[in-house]
Image (cartoon, helix red, strand yellow):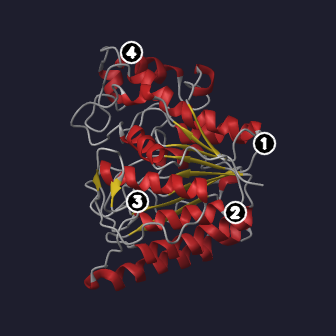
Amino acid sequence: MERRARFVHTESLDRGGYPEGCPFDSRRAGRTFDVVSSLGLLNRINTDHREPQPVARDILEWFHTPEYLEILMAAGYGRHDYKALKMGLGTPDCPLFKQLFEYSVLAAGGTVSGARWILDGEADIVFNPSGGFHHAHPSASSGFCYVNDVVLGAMVLARAGKKVLVVDVDAHHGDGVQDAFYQDGQVTTISLHESGKTLFPGTGAETEIGEGEGRGHSINVPLPVGTYDAVYYRAFEQVVLPVASGIDPDVIIVELGMDGLAADPLAHLNLTNNVYADLLADMVEMDKPLLVTGGGGYNPENTVRGWALGWSVLAEGRQDDLDLNVGLGGVMLENTAWFGGLRDRTLLSHGGYRESVENEIMITIENIQRNVFPLLGV
């Protein structure tokens, strides 16, 4: 039976949002929607488009504190004091803007709505490019993140009795999500990210493996500067795939940040969107419901193209021959078609660090296999 894929977006999220000059471009999701629409990737029997609903207050309080939510709401209307600043609001990476609360709960609503559609059997695959705010904490904003939709989506699924696997491929460690489930064996988190030694938020060491009932259910693959496609995919293949097979989750959540792409201004990895397409195809072939969010990605053009390619894989499956040999950083034409297609060109890794990158990642993989896999029965 063909799987049903749903793209979540509303034009309301294209208006307002993060202020001009902020590295986080809230219009990336709308641009992605335009690209996939122009390519006919929403006009298939197995695909559709729905608008999100804002997250209700009672659901928000499953994770966020009432005091934080009140201060977050006030901050969007110009009421901002030292308590707000202590909660991370009004800082360079969590700027204030008009209707901040309304924007955040609507963007997060795409992920929560997606979880419910999966539970109700309305969709098998849901993509919310406006989501992925994995740094938000119960009483604090952080890293452009105010409301943690990944945590809330996982909670909706877990409270319905589902075993959840969160796979976070953002260049930045998903610290807010890990912390939320650090002692929870029902939600397993795997994060492949640039090492905290060189990148915000400074967490996500391979020794962070969970506590109590959650011991073994937090898995981190810190990556060195310059990590390239082949060795990144090897880490995915040797960590994520066996864990997914071993724990047999009911639903997989994917935080699909695109800041691992080469030339992203806020990270230092050397990936192309081809590796993201490959790992998404692998997860589609697991035949599990998939709830996919956006995330980081601070080169908007490359991020839009990566998400559009990701949606094509979610909707159509593996496409090894799709626009493979095209230029990195294609040009958007007036008709919204990309000059050169969706896929990045293959990048050559710098010979001076290729061997050291591979050696470091292989040591990390071996440590995870030795210290974490036995805890999960993998």
The front one of 351 and 189 is 351
The span from disc 1 to disc 2 (Cα, nearest Å) is: 20 Å
Residue position for label 4: 74
Q: Nearer the viewer, residue 332 or 104?
A: 332
Front one among 112 and 334: 334
Q: What is the x, y in percent for residue 324?
A: 42, 70
Marks 1/3: CA–CA distance = 38 Å
Indicate the position of residue 235 as horizontal and vertical percent values: 51, 73
- Residue at image mark 1: 161
Q: Residue at x 74, y 52 (%)?
A: 250
| Residue 372 in the image: above or below residue 172 | below
Question: Which residue is pictured at 42% across the width and 67% down the height?
Answer: 323
Three-letter code, disc 3: Leu
The image shows residue 68 at horizontal and vertical percentages of 46, 24
Is residue 216 at all visible to an observer of this figure?
no
Residue 156's quadrant in the figure?
A: top right
For the image shown, how many numbered marks are present on the structure? 4
Q: Which mark is residue 145?
A: none
For the residues labelled 1 and 3, say whether their Cβ atoms are less than 8 Å apart. Answer: no
Q: Residues within 10 Å of mark 3 (few under 14, many from 20)?
A: many
Q: CA distance from mark 4 to mark 3?
A: 41 Å
Going by the image, does 173 lie left or right of 219? left
